[in-house]
Image (cartoon, rainbow, N blue to C red):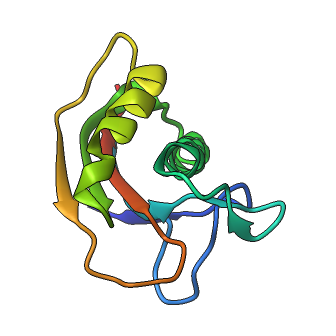
Amino acid sequence: MPREIISTPEAPEYPTYSQAVKVGNTIYVAGTVGIDVATGEFAGPTVQEQARQALRNCQAILRAGGAELSDAVMVHTLLMRPEDADGLIEVFDEFFPDVRPPRCVSKLGVDRPGLLVSIAMTAVTD
């Protein structure tokens, strides 16, 4: 099955990997951080601000591939600080009020100054 690279200027781009890859009707979104592409900076100093921006970035990537957040079937979140889990849940409730995809949370292994969260997901379109 052919693979399609998904890319949008509405989300942070990295030279070493694709924002997403679409295979058939499945989109695999790479770990996406809470950087505001307009400023090139993290959306804020809290996990809530960064998670909101990371989810907006994931949403932009999914849209570029013909999907929406409601098409997510799995979300993998990496947190720098385990104590931020409640703040993360708060944001997920905002973005996934009805359809709650399965998700897992792991400890972020990359120590980048200011980075609190990275979100990857898999979505399936009809």
Name the spot of residue 4 as percent of width and height, x first.
45, 63
Q: Residue furthest front?
A: 83
Q: Residue at x 65, y 56 (%)?
A: 44
| Image position, residue 23 (x, y; %) | 32, 55
Residue 23 in sight in this render: no
Q: Is residue 70 left or right of residue 1?
A: right
Residue under the point 57% across and 81% down: 14
The residue lying furthest to the top in this view is 98
- State the image coordinates of residue 91 (x, y, percent, origin top left): 45, 32
**Given the current orientation, which residue lies at the most extreme right position?**
38
**Front residue of 114 and 51:** 114
Residue 121 x/y as whole percent: 32, 49
Q: Which corner quadrant of the image does residue 7 belong to?
A: bottom right
Residue depicted at x 50% and y 42%: 48
Instruction: Determine whether 15 is above or below 67 in the image.
Output: below
Q: Is residue 40 left or right of residue 76?
A: right
The image quadrant where one finds the N terminus is bottom left
